Every structure is written in C-alpha cells, then in structure tokens.
Image (spheres, helix red, strand yellow):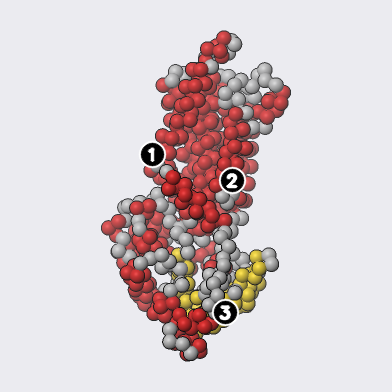
Amino acid sequence: MMTIYVLWLRQVKRYLRSKPRIIASLGQPLLYLLSFGFGFGAIFAKAGQGNYIQFLAPGMIGMTILFTSIFSGIELMFDRQFGFLKEMLVAPQPRLLLMIGRTLGGATTAIFQGVIVIVVCMIAGFRPTNMAGIPIAFCYMVLIAVMFTALGTAIACSLTDMQGFQMVMNFLVMPIYFLSGALFPLTNIPAVMKFFASIDPLSYGVDGIRGALIGLSHFGGLVDFAVLSALTLLFLAIGARQFSRIEA
Amino acid sequence: MIRVDHLTKSFGEIKAVRDVSFEVGMGEIFAFLGPNGAGKTTTIKMLTTLLRPTSGKIEIDGLDPAHQQNEVRKRFGIVFQDPSLDDELTALENLDLHGALYEVPRKMRIERSESLLKLFELWDRRNDPVKQFSGGMRRRLEIARSLLHTPKIIFLDEPTLGLDPQTRNQLWAQVKKLNEEERVTVFLTTHYMEEADRVAHRIAVIDHGAIVAQGTPAELKQQTNTQTLEEAFLALTGSSIREEGADSNQSLRNMAQMWRKKR
C-alpha cells in the first residue's frame, strides 16, 4: 500500500510542479473547442443536430484525458532516460505494485486535466442537461484515464528512443482520437468508419460521458461501462506484465 | 559478504563475463577495475539482481540474487554509473521516497535522512529540487540515498566520473568514514587508479570479461614490478584502446540533451 502511495504521490507532485505542462496541455482542447465548436456550430445546427458545443464538450474531455494519460504512461521512457527507473527496479518491492502506483498517479493527473477542461467548456457555453450525471461521467473519466495510462506504460516498456514516441503519437493516439466520435455523431457514417469507431476504446469513453452529461448515447451506458472496465483490466494486465519484464 | 563462483554471462554470441570468481569479506573496500567494456557493469548488474547470470553462482550475505531478489535488494545500496535521482523532487523527497520503497520506518527515515544529508553536506539544500544541483551534489545525494536503509553492502559504479579533484577527494573521505563507522562493505569501480590505490583494501582487475589479477594494491604492484597502480593496471591489461558500442540508452540520453538545449 505504501509503495503504491509513494509512487502515486511522486507522479502527482511532478505534475503539480510543471505548471507550463498544465497550461500547454490545455491549449489543444481550447483550440479545438474554439475552431470546431464555433466554426462548425452553425453547420451542425443547420443539419438539425442541435448545439455543437454541447455535443463536442464530452469529446474534448475524452481527448484531454487520452493525451494526458498516454503521455503519463510514456513518461516511463523519460524515467529510463534520466535514470530513475533503475532506482525503482532495484527496490525490494514487487514490480506489480510499482506499476500500479505509477499508473494510478498518472491517471490522477489526467483526471485533473479532464476536470479543468470541463470548467473551460462550461465557460465556453457547455451546460450539462443532467446534473445527476456528473458523478457517472466522473466514473467514465477515471476508467479512460487508468486504461490509457496503463496502455502508455505498456508501450513505454518496449520503446527505447524518441522516434518511437512519434510513431505512437501518429499511428495510435491520433487515430484513437479522430475515429472515436469525439468530434462527430456515430450515426449516419459509412460502415468502415463505424467499424473503426466500434473498435476504438475512446469511443466508449466519450459515449459514456456524453450519455451521462447530455443524455445522448450511441452504444448505451451499460455497453460503455462493460467495454471500458474489461479493457482497463486488460491493459493493466499487459502493462504489469511488460513492466515486470524490463531489464536494466 | 559477497561470494562469486565461476560466474558467466553471455549476450547471444558475446561472452561479457567469463568464469569470474572472487570473494569480498565483511567491512572490506573492494575495487573492481578494468578498461571500458571489460564486464564491470555487467557483473554489478548480476550482483544487484538486475541481470540473471548465464551460469555460475553468486552469494550476497548468504543469499542468491537470482532467486531471493527482494531479500538481497534490502541488503545492498547502489550508486549507478548514470544518475538515477528524480530531478523534479527535492533532495529530502528523493530520500523519503527511497526510504518508503525500502520499508524504513518513518521515524528512522527522518533521522537517518538528516544525519546522512549533514554528513554529505547537503542539509542546507534539502528542500531544493535536484535539478538545481551540480554533478558533485547529485553524486553525494545518491550515495546518501544508497545508505538510507542501512545496507550491509554498497555498490559504487564509477561514482567519481566527471567530478573535480576536490569533490572526488571529499567523496572518498566520506565513503571511508562510513566504512569505518558503520562497517559497511564497499564494492566500487573506477577509472582513477590513484583513488583505488588510496581507498581499496583489495583489488580485482578484469579484462575481456575475465579476472586477470587479484590482491592488495601493494601485491599487484609487486606482481607486475611497477611503481604505481596505474602502471600495474596497464601492464595487466595492455595499452590498446577499447571500443564500446553506444547502447540505446546512451543515444536516448543524447537525444534528450539535444532536445533540452533546443528549449
């Protein structure tokens, strides 16, 4: 328990101390919110889909958590680079606990970011239609945060250089974001797109948050919850396995 | 305290360590010397549970590092060749995190952090983040950290690399003091022969993965008929320069440095 706690605390401290990172990571959702939210808002309304900001906000929350948590996981690569990884690897503690502590810490920072984005979205005009849905939305946020931090950790275990990091961003994180239904409704899209969206973990996260906050759900809350829980456990298991195999 | 019997480690075709045997007694300062790529770090990694030997036997305080990993890990402290501190945390936080990972009781963690930081003259800077520390201060902090859980053995892998003579002298004086006061066994590697000569009780010279000589500094000089340990070392290992391939971590580190400069 102590092990999990100290490594969790380390991640949170590192996050709170890098103010530039907090601000920088808010730039992206803000830009999307402005350009897409207000840029496409009129067209979206004309197409009879209602207020685009309402629709987009849960997508922005999902995106922020996706980026922050994958990055927290990948930060393990920096630990390797700056050497702290070795300190963890020789510690007389089971690797599983080290990995869980680190992952929960990373996930916590991602949830922080998500909460900040909710506030930003509300300033931009987002209004949850269902206040009781907020705690439910929070549960979905926790699930995606843990899931993607674990995924990032699993990937970082086998990455040895910065080029690898670029690959992950371009061929994994970006597609997960763009194909997830964060930006557009999943109804009335081509079958291929529908297929990709249905195998994209983030689709279920965004859908769950959207269902909880504005009562609009594509897959249904139960499906979202079941898929996310299963994937979170799976990625945690893969991450733990990869982490226990690292040799210094 | 440390017993190594016919230890061998191969990476594919390459035999990094071949048939190495030696013993280090309790409270001894033992220097492990050799040119670059001789197998020093690989040996340390096997002694400290980070690598599994291909064959041969290791005993640390009577335990086997390959099978009783966590028990062995509690018994040693290590200062790696490369830095291993968390830059964003303060000196005290680094020590505290280490203490928690080694299950040192809270009260003892606080007392021991204070006495070690004072010994290594870092107490005034205890609440500063490590990223503001100089190379020498980081090294001292790492040694302090490696001693926090009162290990029986400390491994120092080239602890003085890149430090000025003042810092190096002071560092060894502190290590010697600890060795005398706490009876901690010291296993060290270095490229500075005069340091090994001054500090170490016994020395093993390793080259191409095998031990070529063992004994006290005086014995080694006598064996090779030389005046200084450096001459003895050259007589034992030849004077050709060793090429070492940069590993992926090294290139990663270079990249990080470039990236940091750009910002």
Q: For residue B193, say whether it is visible.
A: yes
On residue A164, which mark appears?
2
From the viewer's perspective, tell me whether residue A193 is left or right of residue A144: right
Chain ID, mark 3 = B
The residue that label 3 is drawn on is B211
Same chain letter for marks 1 and 2: yes
Above or below B238: residue A232: above
Residue B67 lies in quadrant: bottom right
Residue A187 x/y as whole percent: 65, 19
Residue A130 x/y as whole percent: 50, 19
- Identify which amino acid the numbered label 2 is placed on: Gly
Mark 2: give few (<14), some (14-19) or many (20+) Cα within 10 Å: few
- Identify which amino acid the numbered label 1 is placed on: Lys
Residue A84 x/y as whole percent: 47, 55
Chain ID, mark 1 = A
Mark 3: give few (<14), some (14-19) or many (20+) Cα within 10 Å: many
From the viewer's perspective, tell me whether residue B138 is left or right of residue B236: left
